Structures are given as C-alpha cells and as structure tokens.
C-alpha cells in the first residue's frame, strides 16, 4: 500500500531521470570539445589538436547512422551521432580557417586533387565537406544494397563502434611523436574519460548491442592512456630544441 501511494512521485521521477540520461547521452559527447574550441579561437593556433579526431568521429557516426537503418537501436544514440557529426564539422571549419591563416605555404590543396600525401590536410573547409558527402554516398549505397544481410549489418555496427573506440588514437599518437601534450586541452580529455565511462555504463544498463559495450570499454582505456601521457610529459618535459636565427628577409615571407 505504501509503495502504491508513492507511485505518483516515483513514476514522474523515473521519467525525469530517463529523460536526463537521454539528454546527457545526446549532448554529453559534444561538451568535451567546447574548451578545445574556445582555446583554438583564443590562441588562433590549432596545432595541439589533431583533426584526425574529427575524421574518426565523422566516419564512426556516419556508419552508426547507417547501422540504425539495419538494426534499430535507441533514439538517443541516433541523435547523438547526428549532433556529433555537426559538431565535428564545426571543429573542422575552425581548425581549417586558423591553419590556413597561419600557413606560409599559399599553395592550395583540395580534395579533388586526390593526392594521398595531403589527405585531410586541405586548404578549404568545403573540401572536407565534399569528402564527407562522398563517403556518406558510397557507404549509404553499399548499405542500401546489403541491408537484408544480417552479417553485413552486424559488421557495419561493429565497424562503427570500433572506429569510435579509436577516437583518441590520433591524439595519443600526436602526443607520442611530439613528446608533449602542449596545445591539447586537458579538460577535453577529462571530459572524454567521464563521458565515455558514462556512455559505456549506459550501454551496459540499457542492453545496447554487444559491440557498443566492448568498444566503449576500449575507448575508456585509450582516454586513460592519454591522461597518462599528460602526467608523464608534465613530470618529464622535453627540453626545447635550440632555434637558429632567421634572416629578416625570411620573416617577411
């Protein structure tokens, strides 16, 4: 009787918690990029952020959206992919504008050149959009032809979450090559870690496809590895290399 009397409170509270969790799932993935976006705008320097993070997330979320057509999963996960795709395009736009403004080499590089040496290092945001549209078109066409194959659909879902699990790898590799995390927003990585932990728990508790849970755990491990880099490089900073003086004529170029 007492439990029944509390239903008027527990049912709305349960719905409110469910809506809150869904909203956190949709928009929580975007939050880590806010401090990095602000840092790039403030410093007008995008060298510390690997734009290959954007590439990984664009591929992963486009594949996840296509996976939804073959195997319907929870709507918050679908909306999360749509919101994240738009966010990565905004990050790419800012990084491209900043890089081009600071670049001394004025030679234009475009997607239409089909030069593998300059892949994902183009001079215009429009080239990135062309690449994303081309990938979406090809992947969408293949999915349309193979949508009735359960093996294809499951493989597509696995590729989507595995690609997303590799999100931090470009940043991890960049930090390793430079022996430094300078220019990388530590707040972004901390938010990655907390967000991925929440996301993995959400997958496990809501019975998401197994691929989502396994790759979510892998993603948390990569986040922790980047945090480990930040700690190690802070304790053992790289000695600055000696700079040679440049002639005045070279500075003017």
Image (tube, rainbow, N blue to C red):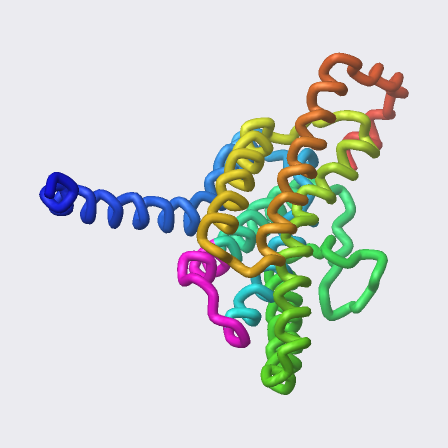
Which quarter of the image is occupied by the C terminus? top right
Return the x and y of residue 133 as percentages of the image width and height: 60, 70
Name the quadrant containing residue 99: top right
Name the residue rendered at 78%, 15% in the picture.
237
Residue 15 percent coordinates (x, y): 25, 49
Q: Position of residue 166 (x, y in %)?
A: 70, 49
Q: Nearer the viewer, residue 144 or 73?
A: 73
Residue 21 seen in render: yes
Asked if 174 appears above or below 181 in the picture, the reply is below
Residue 49 vertical placement versus 160 (above, below)? above
The answer to which of 211 and 42 lies nearer the viewer is: 211
Residue 109 at x, y percent in the picture: 75, 59
Instruction: Please report the residue visible at 69 percent of the width from the left and 31 percent of the height from the top.
Output: 226
Residue 3 relative to residue 189: left or right:
left
Instruction: Give the residue drawn at x 78%, y 39%.
Output: 173
Instruction: Out of 58 and 5, give the one closest to the viewer.
Output: 5
Report whether 150 appears left or right of 172: left
Q: Is residue 40 visible?
A: no
Give the answer, above or below, for where 179 lies relative to 105.
above
Residue 170 on the magenta span: no
Q: Which residues are magenta?
A: 69-83
Q: Quadrant of the N terminus?
A: top left
Q: Residue at x 51, y 51 (%)?
A: 203
């Amino acid at each position: 009787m007492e439990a029944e009397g509390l239903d008027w409170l527990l049912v709305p509270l349960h719905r409110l918690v469910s809506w809150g969790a869904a909203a956190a799932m949709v928009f929580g993935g975007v939050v880590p990029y806010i401090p990095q976006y602000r840092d790039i705008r403030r410093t007008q320097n995008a060298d510390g952020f690997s734009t290959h993070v954007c590439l990984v997330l664009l591929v992963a979320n486009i594949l996840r959206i296509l996976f939804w057509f073959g195997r319907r999963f929870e709507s918050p996960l679908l909306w999360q992919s749509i919101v994240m795709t738009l966010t990565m395009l905004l990050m790419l736009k800012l990084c491209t504008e900043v890089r081009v403004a600071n670049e001394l080499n004025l030679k234009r590089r475009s997607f239409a050149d089909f030069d593998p040496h300059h892949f994902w290092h183009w001079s215009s945001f429009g080239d990135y959009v062309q690449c994303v549209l081309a990938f979406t078109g090809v992947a969408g066409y293949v999915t349309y032809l193979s949508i009735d194959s359960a093996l294809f659909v499951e493989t597509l879902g696995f590729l989507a979450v595995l690609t997303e699990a590799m999100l931090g790898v470009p940043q991890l590799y960049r930090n390793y090559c430079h022996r430094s995390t300078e220019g990388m927003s530590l707040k972004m990585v901390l938010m990655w870690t907390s967000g991925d932990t929440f996301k993995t728990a959400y997958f496990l508790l809501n019975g998401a496809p197994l691929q989502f849970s396994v790759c979510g755990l892998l993603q948390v491990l990569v986040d922790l590895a980047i945090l480990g880099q930040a700690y190690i490089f802070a304790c053992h900073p790289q000695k600055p290399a000696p700079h040679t003086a440049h002639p005045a004529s070279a500075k003017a170029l």
